[in-house]
Image (cartoon, rainbow, N blue to C red):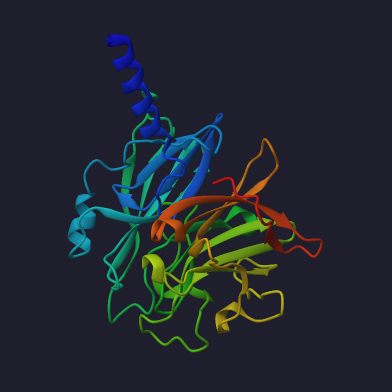
Amino acid sequence: MRYLIFLLLASIQCLAQDNHPPSVHDPVMAKQGDTYYIFATGYGISTWSSTDFQHWKEGPPVFANPPKWALDAVPGFKGHIWAPDISYYQSQYYLYYSISTFGKNRSSIGLATNVTLDPADPRYHWTDHGAVISSVPGKTPWNAIDPNLAIGEKDTPYLAFGSFWNGIQLVRLRKDRIHLAEAPSKAITLASHKKDPGSSGDNAIEGAFIFKKGGYYYLFASIDYCCKGPQSTYKMIVGRSKSLKGPYLDNQGNDLRKGGGHILLAGDTDWYGVGHNAVFHDPKSGIDYLIFHGYDAHENGRPKLRIEPLIWNPDGWPTIQPNTSLQ
């Protein structure tokens, strides 16, 4: 009997760790050794790990307690951290993250660093560096959330960011990738869902991710509305440019700053909406993957992790091959 109970408990634990696929928002991926790590929106920043894209184990949050600076900076923030971005530089992992409250642009982008992603490693510790850039209602025409690190010419680091308001922005960082190299007012607009967005909060574009391939920078973004379950209308667009600073044009030559953007993937009968993607290049396989979340139409719009191989057409545009989802 004890043996049967042990097997039952072990099976329950295994099922709890698999979470196939996990429920996430705004996922990004990094790989250390043979393990893939997902960071996503959640209290303290949610984490997951897998060695096969199929069986996911939930890890500890990045922050056990909300950063004090964030509680002071954004009234109403209670520890639910949005849209992280992960990168590796000079033997450390850089994790940018968003502090905000829904529908407001009193927001900040913070940064934490770690020498390892493995929670079992004795060196595992996230060091918080506080705010990198902030937005203020009535003063800033953009919203400082949804960060993405992008590297331009001469290895110059930039931060792409923005949600609604004036759309997707780009600002230069110092070489340390911790501080701005220019005033926030120097940020330039890369993409907008409206031709004339003004400074209101109804410009439904966010979640920028810049990926360089060949001679182009590809700007991915999400348009329309997330987070509404069966009413979600999220979809992903893409444009490209020879320069990190743009202009980014879609496959019809339309400027993303003026509402352009080729739709890469939209909702269907199985998914109400899909979006907030990252792109991950696996150096071992050489495959590029689109990492994003979708609202499952078979589970009343529950958000789930999706991983799709990116197929690059002969003319250099990314596409999704049907029925190849790994999640």
**Would residue 124 be found to the left or right of residue 258 on screen?**
left
Quarter the N terminus occupies: top left
Q: Position of residue 231 (x, y in %)?
A: 40, 71
- Residue drawn 50% across and 62% down? 271
Q: Nearer the viewer, residue 143 or 293?
A: 293
Residue, far right: 314
Quarter of the figure with residue 132: bottom left
Tag count in the figure? Answer: 0
Q: Position of residue 157 (x, y in %)?
A: 53, 56
**Would residue 312 be found to the left or right of residue 64 on screen?**
right
Q: Position of residue 99 (x, y in %)?
A: 30, 59
Is residue 137 at least partly visible in the picture? yes
Q: Position of residue 28 (x, y in %)?
A: 48, 50
Residue, far top: 2
Q: Nearer the viewer, residue 278 or 303?
A: 303
- Residue drawn 40% across and 49% down? 23
Q: Nearer the viewer, residue 18 or 219?
A: 18
- Residue drawn 60% across and 53% down? 155
- Residue drawn 61% across and 51% down? 308
Is residue 227 at least partly visible in the picture? no
**Would residue 212 be found to the left or right of residue 274 on screen?**
right
Q: Is residue 212 above or below residue 195?
A: above
